[in-house]
Image: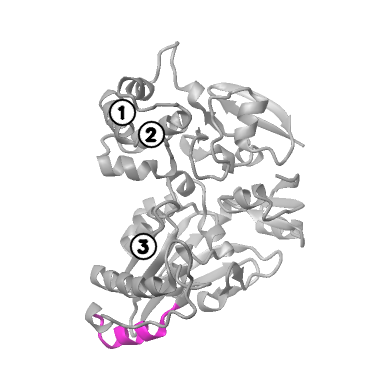
Amino acid sequence: MKDFNYHSAKDSKEASKLASSSSAFLAGGMTTIPSMKLGLATYKDLIDIKNIKKLSGIKVSGKSVIIGAATKHVEVSNSKDVKKAIPSLSSLAEGIGDPQVRNRGTIGGSIANNDPSADYPSACIALNATIHTNERKIEAAKFFKGMFETALKKGELIEAIEFQIPEKSSYQKHPNPASRYAIVGVYVAKHKGDVNVAVTGAKSCVYNDKDMSKALTGNFSSSSIDGMDLDSSEMNSDMHASADFRASLVVTQAKKAVDAC
Amino acid sequence: MGKISLEVNGRKVEKEAPDNTLLSTFLREHLQLTGTHIGCDTSQCGACVVHVDGNSLKSCTALAADVNGSKVTTIEGLETNGKMHPMQEAFKKLHGLQCGFCTPGMVMSAVDLLQKNKKPSDTEIRDWLEGNICRCTGYQNIVAAVKEAATKM
């Protein structure tokens, strides 16, 4: 790994002041460190944000669950408050990677990285999340821009993610047996008035499947999406699953999620 | 360069190390604690698992700098007065290892499991050891060893 300067920031202000075009924020480091070791990413400065107290913790209000960006997956999966308010979010966290990744990886890091197969972006889309940064609030629908791309600007730091508590929800994934990343993951959330069907792993970026969302808003039953023929032309195809198989998996996982709601 | 202060296996250590020093490198090369193994170096195999402030993590995927000030336990820190830890005893007794390369990580990970779940089921043991890869045993005896240790811890 190439050398860099390590900084531990005390607060968001200091973190963004240290940021430059050749720096990265370091939270759990579950992607940043392996990428740097493999030479896929190099930075002059790594700005550790784990010690910024304000960035960790979980708050539940009547309508929403607010999770600090540096909150670890294990904290989300063990939180009684999250389990009670949005049980699907706690089980999503429990299914990320392995125990060592969950002991270290953070929700903000996962979202900022926007891996096309990551679990959390689908929760953000399904649960109408608002991403709070040190500069502004961004709706999840406008946050995830493309493969590993987000609306974040240089030096902009995610401080918290605010999830809307749905009436019912479930996240179901077909995991890669080795990495536990989603080959396809579907997060179904029924809100008052509409249903979101957020899909991860299938395309280059997480998305809300409008057709399934419409069908389920009309009739919230897995029979209303049974046998749906999704367009696979933009879906990923690799050694683990062809695009057609992924299209079929999206429907299967969505049906499982609806049934589990 | 920065100063790294840790408590490793109950002993306070303080050493200068370049900022890009991984925790695994710090343990192996700066402290000569070579029981922590480097298998894949890409965060997958789990041979490098150690405990930091009581929780298991992959030491090849953490910087020494970003665990600064923590308490670290490595495989060398499990024995008491020359006597093996019950998890090590169980791995030995039930042949939970062949070549032994993955064993330090397996043992550290399994000890963390039993700290959090005193009577895990077979499925819970297998799920927990998701991040530890063994290429010899086929895992049957590893799971048996963790179950045996659970009766002794």
Q: Residue furthest top?
A: B81
Q: Chain of mark 3?
A: A
| Mark 1 vs 2: CB contact within 8 A | yes
Q: Which region is colored magenta? A: A208-221
Is label 3 on the same chain as label 1? Answer: no
The mark nearer the N terminus, 1 or 2, is: 2
Q: Chain of mark 1?
A: B
Q: Secondary structure at mark 2?
A: helix
Q: Secondary structure at mark 3?
A: strand
Q: Is residue A239 above or below residue B121?
A: below
- What is the x, y in percent for residue A174? 36, 62
Question: How many angstroms separate mark 3 from mark 1 (CA)?
Answer: 30 Å
Task: Give the residue at mark 3.
Answer: A174
Left or right, residue B146 beside residue A113? left
Q: What's the image's color scheme?
A: one colour
Q: Seen in the image, is A117 located left or right of residue B152? A: right
Residue at the image position 73 percent from the left and 54 percent from the top: A43
Observer-nearest residue: A149 or A89? A149
Compared to A139, does A108 lie above or below? above
